[in-house]
Amino acid sequence: MAVLPPHLLEHVAERFRVLGDASRLRIIEALRGGGELNVGELVERLDMSQANVSKHLRLLHDAGIVARRPQGTAAYYSVADPSIAALCDLVCDRLRAQTREQAEAFAPA
């Protein structure tokens, strides 16, 4: 694997900063499972305020992680970056494996 120059590592760090918020991850998961959703539908599913959902969607959209499709007075959002699903699955699978390993380590003999 090639070593990235520092200016490119800043872009990588910024992507992880955007993904480093549980509310944004909840929005991504809702969109992964629900397809295109508008702000109101996300508010309902996630029990978050409209202002909070909108703020996080703006950050995710600016980062190119979600797409926004206007329709009338609403906008519908979907996951735009196909690597996000693979990244989420990779991290979740690893956390599941670590949890199993820890449980086995503490299991009675």
Image (tube, rainbow, N blue to C red):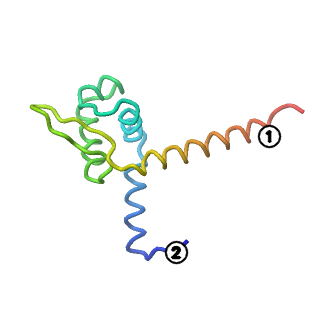
Q: The C terminus lies in which quarter of the figure?
A: top right
Is 2 or 95 nearer to us in this picture? 2
Query: 76 left or right of 34?
Result: left
Callouts 1 and 2 close, C-beta under 8 Å: no
- Above or below for 86 versus 39: below
Q: Amino acid at mark 1?
A: Ala
- Above or below for 71 versus 90: above
| Residue that carries the numbered disc 1 in the rendered image | 105
**Which badge, 1 or 2, is on the more N-terminal residue?**
2
Q: Residues within 10 Å of mark 1 (few under 14, many from 20)?
A: few
Q: Residue at x 41, y 63 (%)?
A: 12
Judged from the image, the secondary structure of the residue bearing numbered disc 1 is helix
Is 20 or 70 nearer to us in this picture? 70
Q: CA distance from mark 1 to mark 2?
A: 36 Å
Q: The N terminus lies in which quarter of the figure?
A: bottom right
Give the x, y percent position of residue 56. Answer: 29, 42
Q: Residue furthest right?
A: 109
| Residue that carries the numbered disc 2 in the rendered image | 2
Give the x, y percent position of residue 29. Answer: 41, 36
Which of pointers 1 and 2 indicates the residue nearer the eye? 2
Q: Residue at x 43, y 55 (%)?
A: 16
Q: Residue at x 32, y 28 (%)?
A: 48
Q: Residues within 10 Å of mark 2 (few under 14, many from 20)?
A: few
Judged from the image, the secondary structure of the residue bearing numbered disc 2 is loop
Q: Amino acid at mark 2?
A: Ala
The label on residue 32 is none
- Above or below for 54 versus 7: above
Give the x, y percent position of residue 8. Answer: 39, 71
Give the x, y percent position of residue 20. Answer: 43, 48
Query: 79 left or right of 16?
Result: left
Query: 96 left or right of 53?
Result: right
Q: Residue furthest left?
A: 72
